[in-house]
Image (tube, helix red, strand yellow):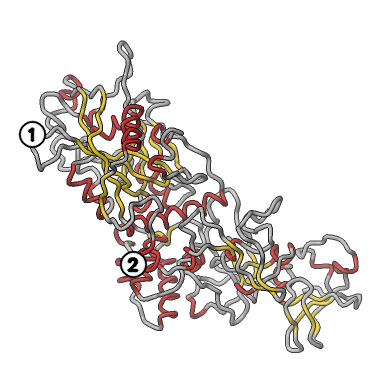
Amino acid sequence: MARGPGTCLRCTGGKLSLRHSGYLGGYICGRRRTCDLCRGGIDATSRAWSCSTKCGWSVCEGCAVRGGLRTAASPSSATSPSSAASPAPATVPPPRGPAPLERKIACRYGSTCYQVNAEHLEIFAHPGDPSYRLGLVTLEAGQKPDLETLWEIFVFYDPRESGHLSRGEFGMAVQEVSARLKLKLDEDDAWAEAGGEDQGHVSFVHFAVWSSRAGLRIPVGLDIDVAAPRACRVRSPEGMCKCANFCRRDGSRETWACNCGHGERSHCSESAQMTLQVMLLSSRPPHWMPGKIGLVPVADTAVLAQFQFLLDVTHLEVPPLVEVNNWTRDRGCSLHGVNGCSGSCAFSNRAPVPRGYRLAGVWRNQNPALWARYSLMRATVLHECSRRGCVPCPVESCKPAFDGLDSSSLLAGANEWRLFHGSSEAACRAICARNFNLGLAGSGASWRAEGAETGSPLYGRGVYLSERITKADEYSGRTHAEPSSKLHFALFCRAIGGRPTVCVENEIDPEALRNQVLCGPYHSVLGDRVSKLRKPFREIVVYDKDQAYPEFLLSYTRLM
Protein backbone atom coordinates (compact mmCIF):
# COMPACT_ATOMS: atom_id res chain seq x y z
CA MET A 1 0.00 0.00 0.00
CA ALA A 2 1.33 3.42 -0.93
CA ARG A 3 2.34 5.71 1.89
CA GLY A 4 3.47 8.69 -0.15
CA PRO A 5 3.01 12.32 0.83
CA GLY A 6 -0.25 14.16 0.26
CA THR A 7 -2.50 16.89 1.51
CA CYS A 8 -5.31 16.75 4.06
CA LEU A 9 -8.66 18.41 4.56
CA ARG A 10 -7.18 20.91 6.98
CA CYS A 11 -4.36 21.97 4.69
CA THR A 12 -6.41 22.36 1.54
CA GLY A 13 -9.64 23.54 3.11
CA GLY A 14 -11.43 21.73 0.32
CA LYS A 15 -14.26 19.25 0.48
CA LEU A 16 -12.24 16.18 -0.34
CA SER A 17 -13.80 12.75 0.06
CA LEU A 18 -12.21 10.11 2.20
CA ARG A 19 -12.16 7.91 -0.86
CA HIS A 20 -9.24 10.09 -2.10
CA SER A 21 -6.46 8.30 -0.23
CA GLY A 22 -3.71 10.65 -1.41
CA TYR A 23 -4.33 13.33 1.15
CA LEU A 24 -3.01 11.18 4.01
CA GLY A 25 0.51 10.21 4.89
CA GLY A 26 1.38 6.94 6.62
CA TYR A 27 0.78 5.02 9.80
CA ILE A 28 2.08 6.67 12.96
CA CYS A 29 2.17 5.75 16.63
CA GLY A 30 2.50 8.45 19.18
CA ARG A 31 0.81 10.42 21.88
CA ARG A 32 -2.95 10.30 22.41
CA ARG A 33 -4.88 12.46 19.96
CA THR A 34 -8.45 12.80 18.67
CA CYS A 35 -9.69 11.66 15.28
CA ASP A 36 -10.67 14.76 13.30
CA LEU A 37 -13.66 12.95 11.78
CA CYS A 38 -15.27 10.77 14.44
CA ARG A 39 -13.81 12.63 17.45
CA GLY A 40 -12.81 9.31 18.96
CA GLY A 41 -9.61 9.05 20.99
CA ILE A 42 -6.40 7.61 19.43
CA ASP A 43 -3.99 6.35 22.07
CA ALA A 44 -0.33 5.32 21.78
CA THR A 45 -1.18 1.70 21.02
CA SER A 46 -3.58 2.50 18.19
CA ARG A 47 -2.70 2.91 14.53
CA ALA A 48 -3.68 6.15 12.89
CA TRP A 49 -3.23 8.00 9.62
CA SER A 50 -1.67 11.43 9.84
CA CYS A 51 -1.03 14.30 7.46
CA SER A 52 2.46 14.24 6.01
CA THR A 53 2.77 18.04 6.33
CA LYS A 54 2.69 17.78 10.14
CA CYS A 55 -0.31 20.09 10.40
CA GLY A 56 -1.78 17.81 13.05
CA TRP A 57 -4.72 16.44 11.09
CA SER A 58 -5.25 12.76 12.01
CA VAL A 59 -7.78 10.06 11.32
CA CYS A 60 -8.31 6.83 13.25
CA GLU A 61 -8.11 3.31 11.87
CA GLY A 62 -11.88 3.01 11.52
CA CYS A 63 -12.12 6.15 9.38
CA ALA A 64 -9.15 4.94 7.37
CA VAL A 65 -11.06 1.79 6.45
CA ARG A 66 -13.94 3.91 5.20
CA GLY A 67 -11.51 6.09 3.26
CA GLY A 68 -10.16 3.14 1.31
CA LEU A 69 -6.66 3.24 2.91
CA ARG A 70 -7.11 -0.35 4.03
CA THR A 71 -9.46 -2.79 2.34
CA ALA A 72 -11.41 -5.14 4.57
CA ALA A 73 -11.74 -8.65 3.19
CA SER A 74 -15.20 -10.14 2.98
CA PRO A 75 -15.73 -13.35 4.97
CA SER A 76 -16.78 -16.43 3.17
CA SER A 77 -19.98 -16.70 5.17
CA ALA A 78 -22.06 -14.72 7.62
CA THR A 79 -21.04 -15.09 11.26
CA SER A 80 -23.07 -15.60 14.36
CA PRO A 81 -23.30 -12.98 17.12
CA SER A 82 -20.70 -14.86 19.13
CA SER A 83 -18.19 -14.41 16.30
CA ALA A 84 -19.18 -10.84 15.37
CA ALA A 85 -15.62 -9.65 15.98
CA SER A 86 -14.78 -9.86 12.30
CA PRO A 87 -14.35 -6.34 10.94
CA ALA A 88 -15.51 -7.26 7.46
CA PRO A 89 -19.06 -7.29 6.16
CA ALA A 90 -20.67 -10.44 4.80
CA THR A 91 -21.58 -10.68 1.14
CA VAL A 92 -25.34 -10.28 0.74
CA PRO A 93 -27.75 -9.78 -2.13
CA PRO A 94 -28.34 -6.13 -3.07
CA PRO A 95 -31.16 -4.53 -1.07
CA ARG A 96 -34.48 -3.99 -2.72
CA GLY A 97 -35.89 -0.57 -3.44
CA PRO A 98 -34.77 2.46 -5.42
CA ALA A 99 -32.07 3.65 -3.00
CA PRO A 100 -29.29 1.06 -2.46
CA LEU A 101 -27.64 1.25 0.92
CA GLU A 102 -23.96 2.08 1.32
CA ARG A 103 -21.49 0.17 3.43
CA LYS A 104 -20.44 2.08 6.51
CA ILE A 105 -18.36 1.68 9.64
CA ALA A 106 -20.11 1.05 12.94
CA CYS A 107 -19.61 4.04 15.20
CA ARG A 108 -17.74 2.86 18.28
CA TYR A 109 -20.08 4.85 20.52
CA GLY A 110 -23.19 3.23 19.10
CA SER A 111 -26.44 4.48 20.59
CA THR A 112 -24.63 6.89 22.93
CA CYS A 113 -23.09 8.90 20.07
CA TYR A 114 -24.25 12.51 19.99
CA GLN A 115 -22.32 13.72 16.95
CA VAL A 116 -24.38 15.74 14.45
CA ASN A 117 -21.80 16.83 11.87
CA ALA A 118 -22.45 15.69 8.30
CA GLU A 119 -19.00 14.12 7.81
CA HIS A 120 -19.50 11.82 10.78
CA LEU A 121 -22.95 10.74 9.65
CA GLU A 122 -21.67 10.18 6.13
CA ILE A 123 -19.00 7.75 7.29
CA PHE A 124 -20.41 5.96 10.31
CA ALA A 125 -23.53 3.89 10.88
CA HIS A 126 -25.40 3.92 14.16
CA PRO A 127 -28.01 1.51 15.53
CA GLY A 128 -31.29 2.17 13.76
CA ASP A 129 -29.68 3.59 10.61
CA PRO A 130 -30.63 1.85 7.33
CA SER A 131 -27.02 0.73 6.81
CA TYR A 132 -26.68 -0.80 10.27
CA ARG A 133 -27.24 -4.33 8.96
CA LEU A 134 -25.25 -7.51 8.72
CA GLY A 135 -23.13 -7.34 5.60
CA LEU A 136 -23.40 -3.56 5.27
CA VAL A 137 -21.81 -2.32 8.48
CA THR A 138 -18.13 -2.94 9.33
CA LEU A 139 -17.41 -3.76 12.95
CA GLU A 140 -13.99 -3.25 14.49
CA ALA A 141 -12.16 -6.23 15.97
CA GLY A 142 -13.94 -7.26 19.16
CA GLN A 143 -16.88 -4.95 18.55
CA LYS A 144 -20.38 -6.42 18.73
CA PRO A 145 -23.49 -4.92 17.16
CA ASP A 146 -25.30 -2.46 19.44
CA LEU A 147 -28.86 -3.80 19.38
CA GLU A 148 -31.17 -2.66 22.17
CA THR A 149 -34.66 -3.39 20.80
CA LEU A 150 -36.47 -6.21 19.02
CA TRP A 151 -36.74 -4.04 15.91
CA GLU A 152 -32.98 -3.40 15.82
CA ILE A 153 -32.24 -7.12 16.09
CA PHE A 154 -34.67 -7.89 13.28
CA VAL A 155 -33.34 -5.15 10.99
CA PHE A 156 -29.71 -6.11 11.60
CA TYR A 157 -30.31 -9.67 10.39
CA ASP A 158 -32.43 -8.55 7.41
CA PRO A 159 -29.66 -7.35 5.07
CA ARG A 160 -31.88 -7.66 1.98
CA GLU A 161 -34.40 -5.17 3.40
CA SER A 162 -37.13 -7.65 2.52
CA GLY A 163 -39.12 -7.10 5.72
CA HIS A 164 -38.91 -10.87 6.32
CA LEU A 165 -36.24 -13.21 7.67
CA SER A 166 -35.21 -16.26 5.68
CA ARG A 167 -34.28 -19.50 7.45
CA GLY A 168 -30.59 -18.57 7.61
CA GLU A 169 -31.23 -14.98 8.70
CA PHE A 170 -33.68 -16.12 11.35
CA GLY A 171 -31.10 -18.64 12.62
CA MET A 172 -28.61 -15.83 13.29
CA ALA A 173 -31.32 -13.81 15.05
CA VAL A 174 -32.06 -16.87 17.22
CA GLN A 175 -28.38 -17.02 18.20
CA GLU A 176 -28.55 -13.35 19.15
CA VAL A 177 -31.58 -14.00 21.38
CA SER A 178 -29.90 -17.12 22.83
CA ALA A 179 -26.81 -15.12 23.78
CA ARG A 180 -28.92 -12.51 25.55
CA LEU A 181 -30.96 -15.12 27.44
CA LYS A 182 -27.85 -17.26 28.09
CA LEU A 183 -29.84 -20.25 26.86
CA LYS A 184 -29.37 -22.73 24.04
CA LEU A 185 -32.42 -22.35 21.80
CA ASP A 186 -33.06 -24.90 19.08
CA GLU A 187 -33.19 -23.08 15.73
CA ASP A 188 -35.48 -25.63 14.06
CA ASP A 189 -38.00 -25.49 16.92
CA ALA A 190 -37.83 -21.71 16.94
CA TRP A 191 -38.39 -21.57 13.16
CA ALA A 192 -41.53 -23.69 13.51
CA GLU A 193 -42.82 -21.74 16.55
CA ALA A 194 -42.36 -18.42 14.70
CA GLY A 195 -44.40 -19.67 11.74
CA GLY A 196 -41.45 -20.16 9.41
CA GLU A 197 -42.43 -23.67 8.37
CA ASP A 198 -45.95 -22.58 7.43
CA GLN A 199 -45.08 -19.30 5.73
CA GLY A 200 -41.54 -19.89 4.51
CA HIS A 201 -40.42 -16.67 6.20
CA VAL A 202 -40.74 -14.81 9.50
CA SER A 203 -42.11 -11.27 9.66
CA PHE A 204 -41.20 -8.81 12.38
CA VAL A 205 -44.50 -9.40 14.17
CA HIS A 206 -43.88 -13.16 14.31
CA PHE A 207 -40.27 -12.60 15.41
CA ALA A 208 -41.33 -10.22 18.17
CA VAL A 209 -43.98 -12.63 19.46
CA TRP A 210 -41.59 -15.60 19.36
CA SER A 211 -38.71 -13.79 21.09
CA SER A 212 -41.04 -12.50 23.80
CA ARG A 213 -42.39 -15.99 24.41
CA ALA A 214 -38.80 -17.21 24.64
CA GLY A 215 -38.32 -14.79 27.54
CA LEU A 216 -36.60 -11.77 25.98
CA ARG A 217 -37.87 -8.64 27.72
CA ILE A 218 -36.56 -5.63 25.82
CA PRO A 219 -38.38 -2.71 24.15
CA VAL A 220 -40.13 -3.35 20.86
CA GLY A 221 -38.49 -0.31 19.28
CA LEU A 222 -41.26 0.68 16.84
CA ASP A 223 -43.80 3.46 17.23
CA ILE A 224 -47.22 1.87 16.85
CA ASP A 225 -48.88 5.16 17.75
CA VAL A 226 -47.99 6.91 14.50
CA ALA A 227 -49.53 10.21 15.64
CA ALA A 228 -47.54 10.44 18.89
CA PRO A 229 -44.58 12.86 19.00
CA ARG A 230 -41.14 11.23 18.86
CA ALA A 231 -38.83 13.30 21.02
CA CYS A 232 -35.06 13.04 20.63
CA ARG A 233 -33.49 11.13 23.51
CA VAL A 234 -29.81 11.90 22.86
CA ARG A 235 -27.86 13.25 25.82
CA SER A 236 -24.71 15.24 25.08
CA PRO A 237 -22.34 17.01 27.49
CA GLU A 238 -24.57 20.07 27.08
CA GLY A 239 -27.66 18.14 28.19
CA MET A 240 -30.65 16.49 26.49
CA CYS A 241 -31.41 17.38 22.89
CA LYS A 242 -34.34 19.81 22.78
CA CYS A 243 -35.89 18.28 19.63
CA ALA A 244 -39.54 17.52 20.45
CA ASN A 245 -40.41 15.46 17.37
CA PHE A 246 -38.60 13.75 14.50
CA CYS A 247 -38.52 15.79 11.30
CA ARG A 248 -36.52 14.62 8.29
CA ARG A 249 -33.55 16.84 7.55
CA ASP A 250 -34.21 19.28 4.71
CA GLY A 251 -32.10 18.66 1.62
CA SER A 252 -30.20 15.77 3.17
CA ARG A 253 -29.40 12.61 1.24
CA GLU A 254 -29.75 10.73 4.52
CA THR A 255 -33.53 10.42 4.83
CA TRP A 256 -33.22 8.91 8.31
CA ALA A 257 -31.58 12.02 9.80
CA CYS A 258 -33.55 14.64 11.73
CA ASN A 259 -33.18 18.41 11.53
CA CYS A 260 -31.59 18.24 14.98
CA GLY A 261 -28.80 16.15 13.42
CA HIS A 262 -29.50 12.91 15.25
CA GLY A 263 -30.76 9.75 13.62
CA GLU A 264 -34.33 8.51 13.49
CA ARG A 265 -33.43 5.76 15.93
CA SER A 266 -32.79 8.38 18.63
CA HIS A 267 -36.37 9.61 18.31
CA CYS A 268 -39.13 7.47 19.73
CA SER A 269 -42.48 7.75 21.43
CA GLU A 270 -43.47 6.17 24.71
CA SER A 271 -45.00 3.19 22.90
CA ALA A 272 -41.68 2.30 21.22
CA GLN A 273 -40.08 1.84 24.64
CA MET A 274 -42.66 -0.72 25.76
CA THR A 275 -42.01 -4.43 25.89
CA LEU A 276 -44.32 -6.53 23.74
CA GLN A 277 -46.25 -7.74 26.79
CA VAL A 278 -47.01 -4.19 27.92
CA MET A 279 -47.86 -3.17 24.37
CA LEU A 280 -50.37 -6.01 24.00
CA LEU A 281 -52.08 -5.03 27.24
CA SER A 282 -52.20 -1.30 26.56
CA SER A 283 -52.86 -1.22 22.82
CA ARG A 284 -56.29 0.36 22.44
CA PRO A 285 -57.34 3.11 20.02
CA PRO A 286 -58.80 6.17 21.77
CA HIS A 287 -62.22 5.83 20.08
CA TRP A 288 -62.85 2.34 21.52
CA MET A 289 -65.52 2.06 24.20
CA PRO A 290 -63.70 1.86 27.56
CA GLY A 291 -63.87 -1.40 29.49
CA LYS A 292 -65.23 -3.43 26.58
CA ILE A 293 -63.49 -6.30 24.80
CA GLY A 294 -64.76 -8.22 21.78
CA LEU A 295 -67.65 -7.28 19.48
CA VAL A 296 -69.26 -4.09 20.78
CA PRO A 297 -72.56 -2.95 19.17
CA VAL A 298 -72.45 0.46 17.48
CA ALA A 299 -75.53 2.44 18.53
CA ASP A 300 -74.68 5.95 17.31
CA THR A 301 -77.30 6.76 14.66
CA ALA A 302 -74.92 9.10 12.81
CA VAL A 303 -72.30 6.34 12.50
CA LEU A 304 -74.94 3.83 11.39
CA ALA A 305 -76.07 6.28 8.72
CA GLN A 306 -72.47 6.48 7.50
CA PHE A 307 -72.32 2.71 7.15
CA GLN A 308 -75.59 2.63 5.21
CA PHE A 309 -74.21 5.29 2.90
CA LEU A 310 -71.06 3.17 2.54
CA LEU A 311 -73.13 0.18 1.37
CA ASP A 312 -75.00 2.39 -1.09
CA VAL A 313 -71.86 3.90 -2.62
CA THR A 314 -69.79 0.71 -2.83
CA HIS A 315 -72.57 -1.32 -4.46
CA LEU A 316 -71.80 -1.77 -8.15
CA GLU A 317 -75.11 -1.19 -9.87
CA VAL A 318 -74.95 -1.65 -13.64
CA PRO A 319 -77.32 0.51 -15.72
CA PRO A 320 -79.54 -1.23 -18.28
CA LEU A 321 -78.22 -1.86 -21.81
CA VAL A 322 -74.61 -1.84 -20.63
CA GLU A 323 -72.41 -4.72 -21.74
CA VAL A 324 -70.40 -4.89 -18.51
CA ASN A 325 -72.27 -6.66 -15.72
CA ASN A 326 -71.73 -7.11 -12.00
CA TRP A 327 -72.01 -10.91 -11.93
CA THR A 328 -69.03 -13.26 -11.52
CA ARG A 329 -68.97 -17.05 -11.37
CA ASP A 330 -68.34 -16.92 -7.60
CA ARG A 331 -71.96 -15.77 -7.18
CA GLY A 332 -73.05 -19.04 -8.68
CA CYS A 333 -75.93 -20.51 -10.64
CA SER A 334 -79.60 -19.60 -10.14
CA LEU A 335 -80.50 -23.30 -10.44
CA HIS A 336 -77.72 -25.11 -8.58
CA GLY A 337 -76.14 -22.49 -6.35
CA VAL A 338 -72.38 -22.03 -5.89
CA ASN A 339 -70.15 -24.87 -7.14
CA GLY A 340 -73.21 -27.04 -7.78
CA CYS A 341 -72.81 -27.34 -11.55
CA SER A 342 -70.48 -26.75 -14.46
CA GLY A 343 -69.20 -23.35 -15.47
CA SER A 344 -71.27 -23.30 -18.61
CA CYS A 345 -74.46 -23.94 -16.63
CA ALA A 346 -73.63 -21.15 -14.19
CA PHE A 347 -72.94 -18.70 -17.03
CA SER A 348 -76.23 -19.61 -18.69
CA ASN A 349 -78.22 -19.34 -15.48
CA ARG A 350 -76.61 -16.55 -13.54
CA ALA A 351 -77.74 -16.03 -9.96
CA PRO A 352 -79.33 -12.59 -9.63
CA VAL A 353 -77.25 -9.79 -8.16
CA PRO A 354 -78.98 -7.71 -5.45
CA ARG A 355 -80.17 -4.21 -6.36
CA GLY A 356 -78.73 -2.93 -3.10
CA TYR A 357 -78.23 -3.66 0.59
CA ARG A 358 -79.97 -2.52 3.77
CA LEU A 359 -77.86 -2.32 6.90
CA ALA A 360 -79.16 -4.24 9.91
CA GLY A 361 -76.38 -3.92 12.48
CA VAL A 362 -72.76 -2.94 13.10
CA TRP A 363 -70.34 -4.23 15.73
CA ARG A 364 -66.93 -2.74 16.43
CA ASN A 365 -64.27 -5.40 17.07
CA GLN A 366 -62.27 -4.34 20.14
CA ASN A 367 -59.53 -6.97 20.20
CA PRO A 368 -56.33 -5.53 21.79
CA ALA A 369 -54.10 -8.48 20.86
CA LEU A 370 -55.03 -8.45 17.16
CA TRP A 371 -54.88 -4.65 17.09
CA ALA A 372 -51.35 -4.65 18.56
CA ARG A 373 -50.15 -7.16 15.96
CA TYR A 374 -51.75 -5.14 13.16
CA SER A 375 -50.28 -1.91 14.53
CA LEU A 376 -46.80 -3.44 14.59
CA MET A 377 -47.16 -4.65 11.01
CA ARG A 378 -48.48 -1.25 9.96
CA ALA A 379 -45.48 0.42 11.59
CA THR A 380 -43.03 -1.84 9.73
CA VAL A 381 -44.70 -1.15 6.37
CA LEU A 382 -44.79 2.59 7.08
CA HIS A 383 -41.09 2.48 7.97
CA GLU A 384 -40.27 0.87 4.60
CA CYS A 385 -42.53 3.22 2.65
CA SER A 386 -41.05 6.30 4.32
CA ARG A 387 -37.62 5.43 2.93
CA ARG A 388 -38.59 4.16 -0.53
CA GLY A 389 -41.70 6.17 -1.20
CA CYS A 390 -45.27 5.03 -1.70
CA VAL A 391 -47.69 6.06 -4.45
CA PRO A 392 -51.26 6.60 -3.13
CA CYS A 393 -53.70 4.03 -4.47
CA PRO A 394 -57.31 5.16 -3.87
CA VAL A 395 -60.10 2.64 -3.45
CA GLU A 396 -63.88 3.12 -3.46
CA SER A 397 -64.41 2.20 0.19
CA CYS A 398 -61.90 4.79 1.43
CA LYS A 399 -63.08 7.90 -0.35
CA PRO A 400 -63.19 11.14 1.67
CA ALA A 401 -66.69 10.41 2.94
CA PHE A 402 -65.42 7.24 4.66
CA ASP A 403 -61.74 7.85 5.45
CA GLY A 404 -62.68 9.05 8.94
CA LEU A 405 -65.42 6.50 9.62
CA ASP A 406 -66.30 6.03 13.31
CA SER A 407 -64.05 9.00 14.21
CA SER A 408 -60.99 6.99 13.27
CA SER A 409 -58.85 8.12 10.34
CA LEU A 410 -56.62 6.02 8.12
CA LEU A 411 -52.85 6.25 7.99
CA ALA A 412 -51.42 8.40 5.21
CA GLY A 413 -48.23 7.45 3.41
CA ALA A 414 -48.60 3.66 3.38
CA ASN A 415 -51.96 2.96 1.67
CA GLU A 416 -53.98 1.97 4.70
CA TRP A 417 -57.45 1.00 3.48
CA ARG A 418 -60.79 -0.17 4.78
CA LEU A 419 -62.06 -3.08 2.69
CA PHE A 420 -64.82 -5.70 2.71
CA HIS A 421 -64.56 -9.44 3.30
CA GLY A 422 -67.68 -11.58 3.01
CA SER A 423 -68.24 -14.89 4.78
CA SER A 424 -70.69 -16.73 7.03
CA GLU A 425 -71.64 -15.32 10.43
CA ALA A 426 -69.67 -18.03 12.25
CA ALA A 427 -66.57 -17.44 10.12
CA CYS A 428 -66.79 -13.66 10.57
CA ARG A 429 -67.01 -14.00 14.35
CA ALA A 430 -64.09 -16.44 14.39
CA ILE A 431 -61.97 -14.02 12.35
CA CYS A 432 -62.81 -11.19 14.76
CA ALA A 433 -61.60 -13.37 17.63
CA ARG A 434 -58.53 -15.07 16.11
CA ASN A 435 -57.82 -13.28 12.80
CA PHE A 436 -57.75 -14.81 9.32
CA ASN A 437 -56.61 -18.36 8.60
CA LEU A 438 -54.69 -18.43 5.30
CA GLY A 439 -55.05 -22.20 5.16
CA LEU A 440 -58.80 -21.78 4.53
CA ALA A 441 -58.35 -19.63 1.43
CA GLY A 442 -60.43 -21.14 -1.36
CA SER A 443 -62.54 -23.31 0.95
CA GLY A 444 -65.56 -20.98 0.98
CA ALA A 445 -67.64 -19.83 -1.95
CA SER A 446 -64.68 -19.50 -4.34
CA TRP A 447 -65.14 -21.16 -7.72
CA ARG A 448 -63.91 -24.77 -7.83
CA ALA A 449 -63.10 -27.03 -10.72
CA GLU A 450 -65.52 -29.90 -11.12
CA GLY A 451 -64.73 -32.58 -8.54
CA ALA A 452 -62.30 -30.41 -6.54
CA GLU A 453 -62.78 -30.14 -2.77
CA THR A 454 -61.47 -26.57 -2.57
CA GLY A 455 -61.07 -23.70 -4.95
CA SER A 456 -57.78 -22.39 -6.29
CA PRO A 457 -57.47 -18.72 -5.23
CA LEU A 458 -56.72 -16.52 -8.23
CA TYR A 459 -53.71 -14.76 -6.67
CA GLY A 460 -52.58 -17.54 -4.36
CA ARG A 461 -53.40 -18.20 -0.73
CA GLY A 462 -53.86 -14.97 1.16
CA VAL A 463 -56.45 -12.64 2.66
CA TYR A 464 -58.83 -11.47 -0.09
CA LEU A 465 -60.49 -8.09 0.33
CA SER A 466 -62.72 -5.96 -1.87
CA GLU A 467 -63.46 -2.26 -2.22
CA ARG A 468 -67.11 -3.05 -3.10
CA ILE A 469 -69.76 -4.71 -0.98
CA THR A 470 -71.17 -6.32 -4.15
CA LYS A 471 -68.05 -8.46 -4.52
CA ALA A 472 -67.82 -9.35 -0.83
CA ASP A 473 -71.50 -10.26 -0.84
CA GLU A 474 -70.76 -13.15 -3.21
CA TYR A 475 -69.15 -14.98 -0.27
CA SER A 476 -71.53 -13.81 2.44
CA GLY A 477 -73.57 -16.51 4.16
CA ARG A 478 -76.75 -16.34 6.18
CA THR A 479 -76.89 -16.75 9.95
CA HIS A 480 -77.10 -20.35 11.15
CA ALA A 481 -78.85 -19.43 14.39
CA GLU A 482 -82.09 -18.58 12.57
CA PRO A 483 -82.43 -20.55 9.31
CA SER A 484 -85.37 -18.41 8.22
CA SER A 485 -83.41 -15.17 8.68
CA LYS A 486 -82.45 -13.20 5.61
CA LEU A 487 -79.47 -11.56 7.31
CA HIS A 488 -76.08 -11.78 5.63
CA PHE A 489 -72.71 -10.89 7.11
CA ALA A 490 -69.48 -9.24 6.03
CA LEU A 491 -66.40 -7.77 7.67
CA PHE A 492 -65.16 -4.25 7.09
CA CYS A 493 -61.41 -4.54 7.68
CA ARG A 494 -58.44 -2.26 7.95
CA ALA A 495 -55.59 -3.37 5.70
CA ILE A 496 -52.11 -1.98 5.22
CA GLY A 497 -51.32 -2.19 1.52
CA GLY A 498 -48.01 -0.31 1.42
CA ARG A 499 -46.62 -0.59 -2.10
CA PRO A 500 -49.01 -2.83 -4.06
CA THR A 501 -47.98 -4.69 -7.18
CA VAL A 502 -50.76 -4.17 -9.72
CA CYS A 503 -51.86 -7.18 -11.76
CA VAL A 504 -53.96 -6.37 -14.85
CA GLU A 505 -53.42 -9.51 -16.92
CA ASN A 506 -55.59 -12.60 -17.20
CA GLU A 507 -52.56 -14.91 -17.06
CA ILE A 508 -51.60 -14.95 -13.38
CA ASP A 509 -48.67 -16.68 -11.67
CA PRO A 510 -49.64 -16.77 -7.97
CA GLU A 511 -46.21 -17.92 -6.81
CA ALA A 512 -44.45 -15.13 -8.70
CA LEU A 513 -46.80 -12.54 -7.14
CA ARG A 514 -46.17 -13.96 -3.69
CA ASN A 515 -42.40 -13.77 -4.22
CA GLN A 516 -42.69 -10.14 -5.36
CA VAL A 517 -44.33 -9.34 -2.04
CA LEU A 518 -42.31 -11.50 0.34
CA CYS A 519 -38.91 -11.13 -1.35
CA GLY A 520 -39.34 -7.98 -3.43
CA PRO A 521 -40.29 -4.33 -3.03
CA TYR A 522 -44.06 -4.83 -2.61
CA HIS A 523 -46.42 -5.40 0.30
CA SER A 524 -49.69 -6.46 -1.36
CA VAL A 525 -51.36 -7.34 -4.65
CA LEU A 526 -53.97 -5.18 -6.35
CA GLY A 527 -55.82 -7.44 -8.75
CA ASP A 528 -57.17 -4.92 -11.26
CA ARG A 529 -59.46 -6.86 -13.58
CA VAL A 530 -61.39 -3.71 -14.49
CA SER A 531 -59.10 -1.36 -16.42
CA LYS A 532 -57.89 -3.81 -19.08
CA LEU A 533 -60.01 -6.97 -18.87
CA ARG A 534 -63.31 -5.08 -18.39
CA LYS A 535 -64.31 -7.32 -15.49
CA PRO A 536 -66.54 -5.82 -12.79
CA PHE A 537 -64.32 -5.85 -9.69
CA ARG A 538 -60.86 -5.23 -8.27
CA GLU A 539 -59.49 -7.24 -5.35
CA ILE A 540 -56.71 -6.63 -2.85
CA VAL A 541 -54.67 -9.54 -1.49
CA VAL A 542 -52.21 -9.59 1.42
CA TYR A 543 -50.15 -12.69 2.19
CA ASP A 544 -49.66 -11.98 5.89
CA LYS A 545 -52.74 -12.02 8.09
CA ASP A 546 -51.25 -9.37 10.38
CA GLN A 547 -51.64 -6.88 7.52
CA ALA A 548 -55.42 -6.98 8.03
CA TYR A 549 -57.50 -6.17 11.09
CA PRO A 550 -61.21 -7.16 11.20
CA GLU A 551 -62.48 -3.82 12.49
CA PHE A 552 -66.25 -4.08 12.01
CA LEU A 553 -68.82 -6.85 11.63
CA LEU A 554 -71.77 -5.87 9.45
CA SER A 555 -75.15 -7.55 9.11
CA TYR A 556 -77.48 -6.63 6.27
CA THR A 557 -80.25 -7.81 4.01
CA ARG A 558 -80.23 -8.04 0.23
CA LEU A 559 -82.60 -5.93 -1.83
CA MET A 560 -83.64 -8.12 -4.76
Closest to the observer, 88 or 518? 518
Q: Is residue 251 left or right of residue 443?
A: right
The quadrant where residue 126 appears: bottom right
- Residue 367, position as x, y percentages in the image: 30, 55
Q: Amino acid at mark 2?
A: Trp
Question: Is label 1 in contact with label 2 (beta carbons under 8 Å)?
Answer: no
Spot occupied by residue 226 in the image (x, y as percentages of width and height): 49, 54
Identify the mark nearer the N-term, 1 or 2.
Answer: 2
Residue tagged by mark 1? 484
Location of the C terminus (image quadrant): top left
Q: Residues within 10 Å of mark 2 (few under 14, many from 20)?
A: many
Q: Is residue 168 shown above or below 305?
A: below
- For mark 1, does the 10 Å Cα neighbourhood hold few (<14), some (14 to 19), or many (20 or more) residues? few
Q: Quadrant of residue 333?
A: top left
Q: Which mark is residue 255?
A: none
Q: Residue at x 55, y 74 (%)?
A: 145
Relative horizontal placement of residue 185, taking residue 59 as reference (left or right):
left
Decide which of 509, 243 is in the foreground and name it. Answer: 243
Q: Write the residue at 61% across / 64% down.
A: 232
Classify 361 as above or below 224.
above
Q: CA distance from mark 1 to mark 2?
A: 47 Å
Residue 66, given in percent of the width and then of the height, sits at 70, 68
Question: Given the current orientation, which residue lies at the most extreme top position?
Answer: 321
Q: Amino acid at mark 1?
A: Ser
Q: Position of residue 512 (x, y in %)?
A: 39, 45
- Identify the residue at image location x=44%, y=71%: 172
Query: Which of these two is toward me, 296 or 223?
Result: 296
Q: Which residue is mark 2?
A: 191
In the rendered image, the quadrant that contains the N terminus is: bottom right
Q: Secondary structure at mark 1?
A: loop
Q: Is residue 24 left or right of residue 418?
A: right
